[in-house]
Image: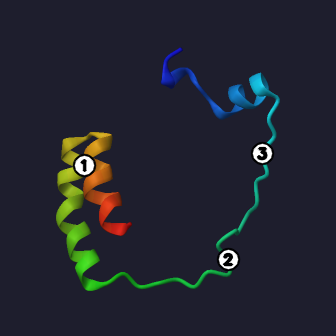
């Protein structure tokens, strides 16, 4: 079965799973201001990641600098 054919609803049904969904799980976490370096890096990388249009590019150019 192709990955695109999977859905959370189907997996829950097939395996008899239930999910516990909480709202506002980060409500008590204070908001942080990104550093100047992170902001500059994302401003530079974002257009490249979007034009490349691949999950790998988005991961390396957008997600990796944050982690």
Where the N terminus falls, by quadrant? top right
Q: What is the C-alpha distance between the residues marked 2 and 1?
A: 30 Å
Where the C terminus falls, by quadrant? bottom left
For marks 3 and 2, the one nearer the N-term is: 3
Query: What is the image's colouring?
Result: rainbow
Q: Which residue is mark 3?
A: 19
**Residue positioned 52% across, 83% down in the render:** 31
Q: On the rendered structure, is 65 left or right of 45? A: right
**Residue positioned 49% across, 18% down in the render:** 2
- In the displayed structure, 52 sits above or below 30; it is above
Q: On the rendered structure, is 51 left or right of 14? A: left
Q: What is the C-alpha distance between the residues marked 3 and 2?
A: 20 Å
**Residue positioned 67% across, 76% down in the render:** 27
For marks 1 and 3, the one nearer the N-term is: 3
Q: What is the C-alpha distance between the residues marked 1 and 3?
A: 32 Å
Q: On the rendered structure, is 38 left or right of 12? A: left
Q: Which mark is residue 50?
A: 1
For marks 2 and 1, the one nearer the N-term is: 2
Q: Which residue is mark 2?
A: 27
**Residue positioned 32% across, 60% down in the render:** 64
Residue positioned most to the top: 1
- In the displayed structure, 56 sits above or below 67; it is above
The image position of residue 35, as x and y in percent, is 31, 84
Q: Which mark is residue 4?
A: none
Please tell me which residue lies in front, 46 or 17. Answer: 17
- In the displayed structure, 61 sits above or below 15; it is below
Q: Residues within 10 Å of mark 1 (few under 14, many from 20)?
A: some
Circle nearer the viewer, 1 or 3: 3
User: SS class of the residue under badge 3?
Assistant: loop
Q: Residues within 10 Å of mark 2 (few under 14, many from 20)?
A: few
- Rendered image quadrant of residue 11: top right
């Amino acid at each position: 079965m192709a990955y695109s054919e999977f859905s959370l609803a189907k997996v829950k049904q097939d395996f008899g799973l239930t999910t516990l969904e909480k709202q506002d799980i980060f409500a008590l976490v204070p908001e942080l201001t990104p550093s100047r370096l992170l902001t500059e890096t994302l401003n530079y990388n974002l257009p490249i990641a979007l034009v490349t249009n691949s999950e790998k590019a988005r991961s390396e150019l957008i997600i990796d600098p944050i982690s």
